[in-house]
Image (tube, helix red, strand yellow):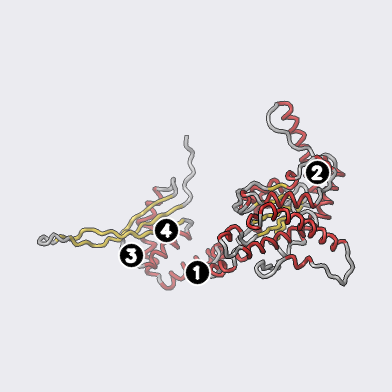
Amino acid sequence: MAIFSPECATVSATLQAVPSKPTGPVDLEVKDAQLIFNSVWKQLEEEYGRGGLRFPRELILLGGAPGAGKGTNTDFIRKQRDITSAPIVISQLLDTPEARKIKSQGGMVGDREVVGTLFRRLLRPEYQHGVVLDGFPRTKVQVECLKLLFDEMIALRREFAETPEAVHFKLPVFHIMVLFVDESESVARQLKRGRQVIAHNEEVKRSGIGEPWEERATDFNEGLARNRYRVFKEQTYYALVSLKEIFHYHFINAQAPLEIVRENIVRELEYQSSLELDPRTFDLLRKLPLSSEIVRHARQDLVRRLEGYQIEKAELLGRVIAFIEAKMVPVVVRHAIPGEATIHTEDALFEDPLALAILIDIFSERGFRANVTIERREIPDRVDLKTGEITCRQKKVFRFNIRFKGSEIRRG
C-alpha cells in the first residue's frame, strides 16, 4: 500500500481536471462532488464557524457486500479501535419514506442528501474520538467528497496548530474496511435473514414480547437480492477500492466462519503508529520496539539465553536450578489451586543480578510467569550504651511472585 503523507500534500490534487482532454463521466462526477461538497461545507462554516468544525479524529468506513456481516462485526471493530460512540449506519440515518422506497428496490439515496446529513452528524461531540460508518462511501461522488473532507481536516489542523484549539484538530485517520463475500453466498445470506425475520416477527406478534425486525424486500426475493449485490459490486466496491492508495485499506474475506473473520480483522487493525501519530511524536517513539516485534522472537531469544547460561555460566545455572528445586517448587505445588505463589528469600545467591535473570528465564521456559522485587529494610544491629546511638544494617529481601494457570476443580 502506498504511504500518503497528509502533512505535505492533499488528496484533492487528484481531482484537478485536465483541460486538454474532453470532459467524460468521471470528470462530471468529480465536478458534481466539488459542487456538493462546497455547498455543504459553506453551510457548516456559516452555522458552526471554522473553529467549530471538529470532525472525528478516526473514521472507520465499513463497507461490505449484502450479508457480509457488517452489523455482526461492527461492535467487534469498535472494541479493537477503542471507539465508544455508537456506529453511524447510513441506511438508518436516511430513513425517510422516499429513501425507504428507493432502498426496497435495491437502489441508493442521492449523494447530496447522504453527504449533507452525514457531515452534520459527524460534528456531534460524542464522535470526536472516532466512529464507525456503516455504508459510506457507496458512490464515486461520495468518494470524492470524502477526499475533500480529509483535505479540509488537514487545513483546519494547520490553521489551528499554534492555538489553544489545536487539541480539537488531531491528525485525521481514515480506515477503509471491506467485508467481502461472493454473489451466491450474499444471496443465500440475504434470503436466510428473510426467513429469520419472518420467524422472529411472527413470534413477536404471537407473544407480544420484543420488537419486530425490519422486513426488506431484498430479503424475500432472489432477484432483488441479486440486484442488491450487483449494485454493491458495480458502485460501492469499486468506489472503496479507489481509496486504497490514499487511506488505510483492509480487505476482509467474510465467507469464513465468524471466529476466522474476526482473527483477520484483528490482524488488519494491528498497531500503525507510523501513520496515525504526529510525525514529531513518532520520531521520538520509533527507536522503541513494538510489542509484536518482541513477542515474535521471544521464544528463540529465551532458548538462546538458556543455552548460553549452560555454556558460559554452568556453575551459576546449576545453583539457581538447585535453589528452585529445593526452595521454590514445594511452595508452588502447595499453591497449585490458586495459581500464584509468593516466595521470600535472603539467599546471597541472588546478589548476582545474573542469577535473578536466570531464575526468571527458567520459570518462563517452564510455562510460568515470574517477577522479582527487591526490598531493602533497615534492621537495628547494635546500640552504643554510652551515646544511645543505634547502628542499623541493611537487610535485603528478594520477593518472587510466581503465577501460572491454577487447578480447575469442581466446587459444590
Q: Which residue is mark 2?
A: 99
- Residue in view at x 90 percent, y 68 percent: 22
Q: Amino acid at mark 3?
A: Leu
- Residue in view at x 44 percent, y 49 percent: 339
Q: Return the x and y of residue 299 as percentages of the image width and height.
A: 53, 63
Tell me the element at label 4: strand
Q: Amino acid at mark 2?
A: Ala
The quadrant in which residue 289 appears is bottom right
Q: Which quadrant is the N terminus positioned in?
A: bottom right
The mark lying in front, picked from 3 and 4, is 4
Q: Is residue 93 left or right of residue 301?
A: right
Tell me the element at label 2: helix
Q: Return the x and y of residue 355 as percentages of the image width and height.
A: 38, 66
Above or below, 109 against 12 in this view is: above
- Residue in view at x 43 percent, y 69 percent: 309
Q: Amino acid at mark 4?
A: Asn
Q: Does label 1 or label 3 sit earlier along the sequence?
A: 1
Report how far apart the C-alphas of labels 2 and 1 lie in the structure: 64 Å
Residue 290 visible from this viewpoint: yes
Q: Is residue 388 left or right of residue 351?
A: left
Q: Which residue is mark 4?
A: 371
Q: Return the x and y of residue 23 as percentages of the image width and height.
A: 88, 65
